Amino acid sequence: MTTESEHDRAHRQRWWILAVLAISQLMVILDGTIVNIALPTAQRALHFSNADRQWIVTAYSLAFGSLLLLGGRISDYIGRKNALIIGLAGFAGASAFGAAAQNFSMLVTARTIQGVFGALLAPAVLALLTTTFTDPGERGKAFAIYGAVAGAGGAIGLILGGVLTTYASWRWTLLVNLIFAGVAITGSMALLKRDRGVDHDPLDLQGVVSVTLGLFALVYGFSHVETTSWHDRFTIGSFVVAAIMLAYFFIVQVRTKYPLLPMRVLADRNRGGSLFAMLVAGIGMFGMFLFLTYFLQTTLGFSAVKTGLAFLPMIFALTTTAQLSNIVLLPKLGPRPLVPLGMVMAAAGLFWLSALDIHSTYVGGVLLPLILIGLAMGFIFAPAYNTATLGVAPHDAGVASALVNTSQQIGGSIGTALLNTLAASAATSYLVGKPATLLNQQIAAVHSYTSAFTVSAFIFLGGGVAAALILRSGAPAAHDASEVPVAAH
């Protein structure tokens, strides 16, 4: 009877565990955009330059993106509950330090530390979700909710950032993390079993150093492009270092006895296709958020709060299709029809946005394509998260989860750098031979945004074709039932 009652309690607690994990993931995801809204205010308060401003964003993405695989390995080694609580506490501490910043150095240091603990936190969250929800029916519901949170987190960050900056202080865009972390730590300690780790193999130091340096150089290269050019020697040097280090990393992984990233994790076609989908979605989503935010604020004159609220229809649409795709369609059809469909729908929405001009309105020009993109993202994110971690052995769950986060993070870095560069070039090209009147400058700005939307649309179209070729047909294989939930006893 004792075993049965523990099982019943674990069954009841799974949904509370999901709530804790969703709060933790939301904190990490929205931190990519919540601070962006507050940056102009923080810049005035702390008196740092436009060139320095970029580093408030870049410091977080550099630390987060480059350390994710190591974070996944550490969570496998020390236990997911330990990794989650340490990550939450460290993230909250860094946020408090940043909120108290008196100068640029303090703020950029805080953002870097946030990225470090985020890299430990994010893989632990997804690994816990993977090993907690093993029943196929419940797993679909859980990943639908998780996918909706992950996909909508950026928009939620815009809303929350706008509200806090306008009605409180830019410092509250960091302090709010203490609330998220406090709730998540309390829930984790009450609900999660203290696991001792599932992978105690020796640490692959060559793999750790090469992949960390490689990912750091890759993210830095794309970040550097935004403030310089593709021809800048530091940009080129960064990409060369990234290529060498990542190539060496994969050579090491094939040859070493205890690899940081076992090749068996990448061997499954559905997992590979899902990781690719996250990469493409990261490129397109970051570009859409960035340039649509510019359009709403600079062209339509929306406030920070109104800009955030303008994304609400997209969040509702995304949540709807995340539930539909993961709970109803994925178990029957598999990811192959769903993810490419989402890619094509996203492309259609972005092509639609590319028709915007200086006379467009929110209701007439933005609302419907934004809803279409939200519907599309629900077909991409939820099935991709679910499929990328389906059937992973318990001792590989951390590194598989880190791969998903890495794909999305690298995609965001590529998208921001690539689309920023293309948009700036489009604006410059438009103004060639034209008088620099205010009207022409406004038209050039909108032209730069629509050019970015067009390129994003083609990226999604290409991603849809590739995903259709990579992903397998048919319903996904049943999950390994031997995995046990991690609810508290």
Image (cartoon, rainbow, N blue to C red):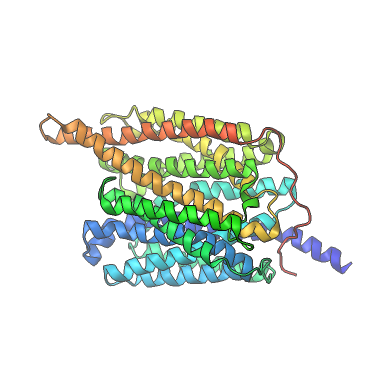
189 shown above or below 40: below
x, y percent for residue 181: 51, 66
Query: Residue 31's image quarter?
Result: bottom left
Expressed as whole percent of the image width and height from the top left, the position of residue 103 reads: 26, 70
> What is the quadrant of the C terminus in the image?
bottom right
Query: Could you tell me which residue is drawn at 42 percent across and 31 percent down?
Result: 458
Q: Is residue 120 above or below residue 379?
A: below
- Residue 474 or residue 252, whichever sits in front: 252
Q: Is residue 372 visible?
A: no
| Relative image position of residue 6 (x, y in whole percent) | 80, 66
Using the rendered view, name the quadrant where residue 440 is placed.
top left
> Which of 76 and 290 lies nearest the eye of the viewer?
76
Task: Name the residue nearer the viewer: 390 or 159.
Answer: 390
Side of 412 where 16 appears, left or right: right
- Write the residue at 29% across / 56% down: 54
Residue 239 appears in the picture as rendered: yes
Quadrant location of the N terminus?
A: bottom right
Residue 161 image position (x, y, % from top left): 38, 55
Which residue: 48% across, 66% down?
Answer: 117
